[in-house]
Amino acid sequence: MAIASKGSNRKRATNRVEDVRVLRVGHRPGRDPRLTTHVALTARALGARRLYLHPADPAIAERLAAVRERWGGEFEVEGIQDYRTLLRTWPGTIVHLTMYGLPLDRVIRRIRRDRPVLVVVGGAKVPSALYQMASFNVAVGHEPHSEVAALALTLDRLMGVPGPGPRSGARQWIRPRAHGKSLAERKDAP
Amino acid sequence: MAIASKGSNRKRATNRVEDVRVLRVGHRPGRDPRLTTHVALTARALGARRLYLHPADPAIAERLAAVRERWGGEFEVEGIQDYRTLLRTWPGTIVHLTMYGLPLDRVIRRIRRDRPVLVVVGGAKVPSALYQMASFNVAVGHEPHSEVAALALTLDRLMGVPGPGPRSGARQWIRPRAHGKSLAERKDAP
């Protein structure tokens, strides 16, 4: 039996990559705070450990720190000025998301081999050097869509979608409901 | 052997839902054109047939028409004023994406049964009636993240990620490359 391609739950759990981080390049502070916030929230919600943000944007780092304060987990936003050094010294696989790349589900097995995994999400203009520095240029569909969508599907293939329940240090978490809303809160929160 | 849960390629193809449409409620024209554009592009790129947009926003409809003109396919944006009637008269399943709902991968098999599928993406404030009108309230992760990410993963579970190659009527399409960019163009385009 072949190793997981897209993978069922069981297969995916077996091959789950523990340490995935995201690099967002070409962020424009002030211009697209909402979109980069969506990138950051998606990275966090789907289990990435960290977002490296180029250039730094304290407003987004603070926003995500506030989310962590309530919802727990270890996710952090780290502003960086020099992303080329991060890429050059990365010890595992670098996955650059671009609609010109190879189909995600065709390369996912190879991506999983060498860890940790850094997923690079470009902004409006991506320097062509990125295509060379990446271990894999990967497309999620081969048409213009959203870097948030591409990131979500890539993280899903690497780690799966987290189930319900509190994260470490959470003050609140959701109890899934067929209808309506149920939010649990830790009473002894500091 | 059980029917697909998250499903391998083969299983997913078997259970692929042909007609999936998206309803975006609570769009704020002028305020969040980029985010709704990402919702629309994601819906299109992942195979949805149509985006119903409430309220209507001609700028986004034109933007997506221009994408279709170049990249082909049948996707359209249809502005609507009365989304409750759309929900009340919908002939298949209505999936409302909310972080308070049931885990996507726990209900996906039931969602696939009754077609066509309408996926509802809320905006900032969602009327509570939506929770009642939906066949399923579904969460993709149970933490705040992005409606674009949630939509992408839901469409993936319903239809899979489209492979490369031209769509019907396309003037251009991408040839996947390990490095660099390759765009094919139809020479005899009208």
Image: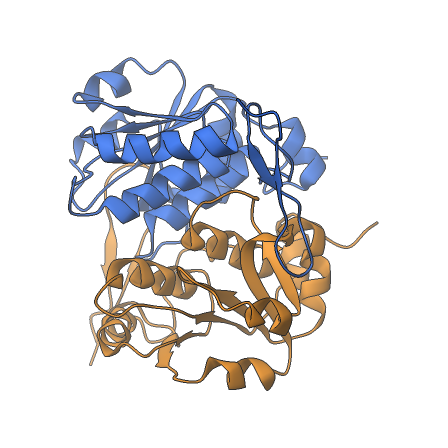
Chain colours: A blue, B orange
| Residue depicted at x 53% and y 32% | A109
| Residue depicted at x 62% and y 61% | B137
Residue B50: x and y in percent read 43, 75
Q: Nearer the viewer, residue B36 or A70?
A: A70
Residue A140 can be seen, yes or no = yes
Question: Relative to B129, is B81 above or below?
Answer: below
Residue A3 can be seen, yes or no = no
Q: Quadrant of residue A172?
A: top right
On the rendered structure, is A93 left or right of B179?
Answer: right
On the rendered structure, is B104 left or right of B68?
Answer: right
Residue B11: x and y in percent read 68, 54
Question: Relative to A83, is B151 above or below?
Answer: below
Image quadrant holding the N terminus of chain A, namely: top right
On the rendered structure, is B149 left or right of A127?
Answer: right
Q: Nearer the viewer, residue B14 or B103?
A: B103
Residue B22: x and y in percent read 47, 70
Q: Quadrant of residue A44?
A: top left
